[in-house]
Image: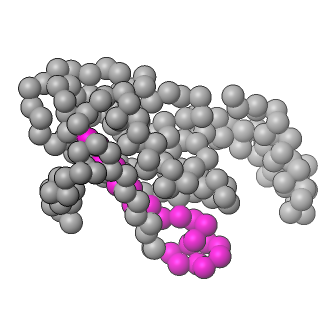
Amino acid sequence: MIDHEKIEQAVRLLLEGIGEDVNREGLLETPDRIARMYEEIYGGMEEDAGIHLSKTFTVESREMVIEKDITFYSTCEHHLLPFYGKAHIAYIPDGKVVGLSKLARTVEVFARRLQLQEQLTGQIADALMEYMQPKGALVMIEAEHMCMTMRGIKKPGSQTVTLARRGVFETDPSLEERFFRMLGR
């Protein structure tokens, strides 16, 4: 649970720590603004992906379903800087599908936490397998990390790509090839 008051105190200390005057007009409301922002961008901490993935529909098809280019924003747990990009999700139903918006909501649940991209990719794939019980799931994330672009190595535009394969995607390479063809890659 997010503690608004603790965040405000921490922001005041941070501002003082970098040499700012916390009583300066432009900073007076900053601790409250940051606390409210954190409630929004870390809202996934308390959220369960199962809520979104539990509403399914019966289908006869066993063909691959892909939702691509799901924009997300997350925060690197190492530097507390944003990383953002696109998630691409594929699954092979085993008698049931989920509403397409639920896939994007699942990405949001896990992206709105302090994260590592590798972990985020696996969490989404694992949630699909747990709650939808498809024959297989594949999640690919492409993201730019501000910890690499605005500090450290300073390489803007570089992309980190992660992939998580579960179920039949682990055992049948032709399914992964089909996924990449369908993505246009």
For residue 79, which quarter of the picture?
bottom right
Residue pictured at 38% horizontal, 30% vertical: 130
Return the x and y of residue 171 as percentages of the image width and height.
24, 51
Decide if residue 138 is on the left or right side of residue 51.
left
Residue 56 shown left or right of residue 63 in the figure? right
Which quarter shows the C terminus? bottom left
Q: Is residue 179 visible?
A: no
Tell me where residue 167 appears, x and y as whole percent: 28, 42
Residue at screen point 54% across, 41% down: 112
Q: Residue at x 48, y 64 (%)?
A: 144
Please report the residue visible at 77 percent of the width from the left and 46 percent of the height from the top: 30
Q: Is residue 155 magenta?
A: yes
Nearer the observer, 77 or 5: 77
Foreground pick, 51 / 91: 91
Look at the image and say whether residue 83 sits in the magenta stretch: no
Q: Is residue 76 visible?
A: yes
Scheme of image coloration: one colour
Where's residue 135, x and y in %? 23, 36
**Above/below status of 128 relative to 83:** above
Name the image quarter holding residue 76. Answer: bottom right
Pick the residue in front: 137 or 19. 137
Q: Which residues are magenta?
A: 136-156
**Residue lying at the far front of the rendered structure:** 171
| Image quarter in which the N terminus is found | top right
Instruction: Give the mark count.
Output: 0
Image location (x, y in percent) of residue 182: 16, 56
Direction from residue 98 to residue 6 in the image, left or right: right
Please indicate whether residue 100 sits to the left or right of residue 118 in the image. Answer: left
**Quadrant of residue 131 within the rendered picture:** top left
Q: Nearer the viewer, residue 124 or 100?
A: 124
